[in-house]
Image (cartoon, rainbow, N blue to C red):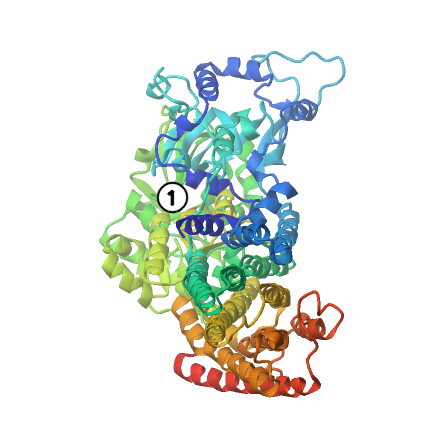
């Protein structure tokens, strides 16, 4: 039992992870801290040597310059070192995939039973059992490869690129200039797929970027990188271009080098240029990935549910099979035959089709969603979609359009001001970090560039990048070399905290309490109009200072505001309405202020049940937050950690939580959620953290995903309910027959063939219809409900099995060992037909065939298997399976038994629904 538990745990944890998106899995599977010890000493020495070598020396080693490589040089290097992909991201070979499709505890158990049958000279039984294993394995292999091919095709649509500097090709015969010589050929910035990078490429990095390869920093401005996946350190690490300082001591390891950045980490803030040192399997991450062979994800609610249900069935089998063996051995005296019969019962009780049914239903859902331009990175995310009862979403660019319009630019008192637009333009134009939607809206006013004569009048001196603590960023420019201007823009509250004065035309006024109230009144009015307000401030500084820091953002003068119209997407309102109708509560988690957020919620029809702000959340303990997350809809002015904490608290309250976001600040919450949803236009780190990526702008696909997830769950539940109840009833019938009959109720071979046919009939379950009423509310695993269902419906089949025993014994006189073949043939047909029919009884709470019809594939498969079940004892193969033709009156009894079974099951179903409900 312990062995099966371990195998099943591994199977569940690993098999539903997409093989196309395992980078995050590899990183998270590594033990926290000390991870560099898993990398070869040769690689560590190589990286540390390149970190300590001066930059010209590194460039010379790599055969590149500050202007980068040419396309021809890059192609030649790529031919030598290969694409920038780690080995684990390649599709599995079909033999490896075949092994993984076979390797689950149910197939292993059946294999053992097949070997035992062969060793006990039951060749026919061994062949039938082997056929079951082959059927389960091959069907699963086909379904998974179909799903992987669909996901692979869509993966190509996801834009994971890097900004690269490439030199223009030199003319034939030209001599390449030395590194320190002036550039003879121009270099340009281009966007390349990450897999095309090669050692020697020069890449540009900014906030939100995933580091595409192992790189040496060439230039940096306030560059902070999150290396938590590598080192376990939660705080970002600042990186510098120099080779001096504490980080470069001889004792420092590769990860401690301040001028190295590594594939798989991400830029939190700042900007940099870097030269690629290593790509693909030759990177630090690539070496780790090839060494980690048991990378597993945290087991989620879906996997726990399947695990519990499977163990319920396995424990039942392990208890009942020995009892069947002992009773038949004691009552019949033929212990070898009793052993083979118990072996056949064990096969019948093994839910060998469960892995195939689970995989097929999930793969079918993934294929359907792929047609709607939705990338499913993990198959079990589809079921989590259906179980989701709370969706937390960012506002900007998610609920709202990803193109923000600059609506107003006003002075401190709300009057239109071109001066404010000019300062805002300078800030957005000269900043080198991640240009967000607001910057792009400002930069669309290209006429400002002409009016200010940027090239003639302004020179950039320095920059203080944005971060989520300050929520503002500054650039410093020199105006005609006369003085420096520090221009700061950001959230109103944070700008006001750095200001001591305000500008009113040509006058400068003190920012006292009365003035602060006037300012807040103006910004509040703009917010209430649904505008997102960004404050702009500045100060003049003597030209002697050349390096600036956050400390210089003080004693600023407030100039005015730029206000943006952030209209909702056309699909937002109907999508939220549809989600609410399907039992999904939507909560908005945003870094924006509560007034703008409330206005957007009003526009999309989302009822706002109060707002909680980030500072309030910081002051709450877990108990208070657990209550707040249930009572409120809007959470505003949040930091990334606030968002993550809210998501985790909702999960701890028992919810299945989805999070949808596209920004750097959304990545922690995306990772913390049961299902992370992002869009193709999101920053790299957000797409990396997500489980599902939407390639289309319409949010209506969210409802479709939820419904598809619930259909997937319902179809899995059909098989599990049917298997559990049927197994319970069959064992009870076998026990009764074993006690009172002088012969076996069915031969081992017959029992195995019946089970094989029954398995075949279930192949079509993943393609069945699901009643609309069953997908209106979130669906979750409930093992207690499975046990209760088994106890209620299992004995019903036993009633009609025992009725069949009585009919065969008393009506058709099959009451002696000489007539056991007739008895066994009669029960073979009734048992197969009732087992095949039960799926139609329990697939719906409605009256089957009348109020709710199964899909054509399931109906067709049911009729085919029922026909084969009747043909076997009536046709030429009867002697091979030790069956015999049934008399014509038997079929009248058969019809009556099936009709009575359907009627009684329907009545029991109504009673069950009234008492316990139905999902």
- Report x, y in % for residue 171: 75, 18
- Report x, y in % for residue 21: 54, 44
898 or 543: which is nearer to us? 898
554 or 280: which is nearer to us? 280
Quadrant in the picture for residue 73: top right
Residue 176 in the figure: left or right of residue 200 = right
Residue shown at 72% from the left, 13% from the top? 174
- Report x, y in % for residue 126: 61, 55
Q: Do we see residue 505 in this rendering?
A: no
The local secondary structure at tag 1 comes to: strand
Residue 349 in the figure: left or right of residue 158 = left
Query: Is residue 574 depicted above or below 648 in this figure?
Result: below
Residue shown at 48% from the left, 65% from the top? 333
754 or 195: which is nearer to us? 754
Query: Is residue 497 depicted above or below 76 in this figure?
Result: below
588 or 878: which is nearer to us? 878
Query: Is residue 191 depicted above or below 468 in this figure?
Result: above
Residue shown at 41% from the left, 49% from the top? 298
Q: Residues within 10 Å of mark 1 (few under 14, many from 20)?
A: many
- Figure label count: 1
Quadrant in the picture for residue 719: bottom right
Quadrant in the picture for residue 712: bottom right
Q: Residue under circle 1? A: 472
Q: Do we see residue 767 in this rendering?
A: yes
- Report x, y in % for residue 25: 47, 43
């Amino acid at each position: 039992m312990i062995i099966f538990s371990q195998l099943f745990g591994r199977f569940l944890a690993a098999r539903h992870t997409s093989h196309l998106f395992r980078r995050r899995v590899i990183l998270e599977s590594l033990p926290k801290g000390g991870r560099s010890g898993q990398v070869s000493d040769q690689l560590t020495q190589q990286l540390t040597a390149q970190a300590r070598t001066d930059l010209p020396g590194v460039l010379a080693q790599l055969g590149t310059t500050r202007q980068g490589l040419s396309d021809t040089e890059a192609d030649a290097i790529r031919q030598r070192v290969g694409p920038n992909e780690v080995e684990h991201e390649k599709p599995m070979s079909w033999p490896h995939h075949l092994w993984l499709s076979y390797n689950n505890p149910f197939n292993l158990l059946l294999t053992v039973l097949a070997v035992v049958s062969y060793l006990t000279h039951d060749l026919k039984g061994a062949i039938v059992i082997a056929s079951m294993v082959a059927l389960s394995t091959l069907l699963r292999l086909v379904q998974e490869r179909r799903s992987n091919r669909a996901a692979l095709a869509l993966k190509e649509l996801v834009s994971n690129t890097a900004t690269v500097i490439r030199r223009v090709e030199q003319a034939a015969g030209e001599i390449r200039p030395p590194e320190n010589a002036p550039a003879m050929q121009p270099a340009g910035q281009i966007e390349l797929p990450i897999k095309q990078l090669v050692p020697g490429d020069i890449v540009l990095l900014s906030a939100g970027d995933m580091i595409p390869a192992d790189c040496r920093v060439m230039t940096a401005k306030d560059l902070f990188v999150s290396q938590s996946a590598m080192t376990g350190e939660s705080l970002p690490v600042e990186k510098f271009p120099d080779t001096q300082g504490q980080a470069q001591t001889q004792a420092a390891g590769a990860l401690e080098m301040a001028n190295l950045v590594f594939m798989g980490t991400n830029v939190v803030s700042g900007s940099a240029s870097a030269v690629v040192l290593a790509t693909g399997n030759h990177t630090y991450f690539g070496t780790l990935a090839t060494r980690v062979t048991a990378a597993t994800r945290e087991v989620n609610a879906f996997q726990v549910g399947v695990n519990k249900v499977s163990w319920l069935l396995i424990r039942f089998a392990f208890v009942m099979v020995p009892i069947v063996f002992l009773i038949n051995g004691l009552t019949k005296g033929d212990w070898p035959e009793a052993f083979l019969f118990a072996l056949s019962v064990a096969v019948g009780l093994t839910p060998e089709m469960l892995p195939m049914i689970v995989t097929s239903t999930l793969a079918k859902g993934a294929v359907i969603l792929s047609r709607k331009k939705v990338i499913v990175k993990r198959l079990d995310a589809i079921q989590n979609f259906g179980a989701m009862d709370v969706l937390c979403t960012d506002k900007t660019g998610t609920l709202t359009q990803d193109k923000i319009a600059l609506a107003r630019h006003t002075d401190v008192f709300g009057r239109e001001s071109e001066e404010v637009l000019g300062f805002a333009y300078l800030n957005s134009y000269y900043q080198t970090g991640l240009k967000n939607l607001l910057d792009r809206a400002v930069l669309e006013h290209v006429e400002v560039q002409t009016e200010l004569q940027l090239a003639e009048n302004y020179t950039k001196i320095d920059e203080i990048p944005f971060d989520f603590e300050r929520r503002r960023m500054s650039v410093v420019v020199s105006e005609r070399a006369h003085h420096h201007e520090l221009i700061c823009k950001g959230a109103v509250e944070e700008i006001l905290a750095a200001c001591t004065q305000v500008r009113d035309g040509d006058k400068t006024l003190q920012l006292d309490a009365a003035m602060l109230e006037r300012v807040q009144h103006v910004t509040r009015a703009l917010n209430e109009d649904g505008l997102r307000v960004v404050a702009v401030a500045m100060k003049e500084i003597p030209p002697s200072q050349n390096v600036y820091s956050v400390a210089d953002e003080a004693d600023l003068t407030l100039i005015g505001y730029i206000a943006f119209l952030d209209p909702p997407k056309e699909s937002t309102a109907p999508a939220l309405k549809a989600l609410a109708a399907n039992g999904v509560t939507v909560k908005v988690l945003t870094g924006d202020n509560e007034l703008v957020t409330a206005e957007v919620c009003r526009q999309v029809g989302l009822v706002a049940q109060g707002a909680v702000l980030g500072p309030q959340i910081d002051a709450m303990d877990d108990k208070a937050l657990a209550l707040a997350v249930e009572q409120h809809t809007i959470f505003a002015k949040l930091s990334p950690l606030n968002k993550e904490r809210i998501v985790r608290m909702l999960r701890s309250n028992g919810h299945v939580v989805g999070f949808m976001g596209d920004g750097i600040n959304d990545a922690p919450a995306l990772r913390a959620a049961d299902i992370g949803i992002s869009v193709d236009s999101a920053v790299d780190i957000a797409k990396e953290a997500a489980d599902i990526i939407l390639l289309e702008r319409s949010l209506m696909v969210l409802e479709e995903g939820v419904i598809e997830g619930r259909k997937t769950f319902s179809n899995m539940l059909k098989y599990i309910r049917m298997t559990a109840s049927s197994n319970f009833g069959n064992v009870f019938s076998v026990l009764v027959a074993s006690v009172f009959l002088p012969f076996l109720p069915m031969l081992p071979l017959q029992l195995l063939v019946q089970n094989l046919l029954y398995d075949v009939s279930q192949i079509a379950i993943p393609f069945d219809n699901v009643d609309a009423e069953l997908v209106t509310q979130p669906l979750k695993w409930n093992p207690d409900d499975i046990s209760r269902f088994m106890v209620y419906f299992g004995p019903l089949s036993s009633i009609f099995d025992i009725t069949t025993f009585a009919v065969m014994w008393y009506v058709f006189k099959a009451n002696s060992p000489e007539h056991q073949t007739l008895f066994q043939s009669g029960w073979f047909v009734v048992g197969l037909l009732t087992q095949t029919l039960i799926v139609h009884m329990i697939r719906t709470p409605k009256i089957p065939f009348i109020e709710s019809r199964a899909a054509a594939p399931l109906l067709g498969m049911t009729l085919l298997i029922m026909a084969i079940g009747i043909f076997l004892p009536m046709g030429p193969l009867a002697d091979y399976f030790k069956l015999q033709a049934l008399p014509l009156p038997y079929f009248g009894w058969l019809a009556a038994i099936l009709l009575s079974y359907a009627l009684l099951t329907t009545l029991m179903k109504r009673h069950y629904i009234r008492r316990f409900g139905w999902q």
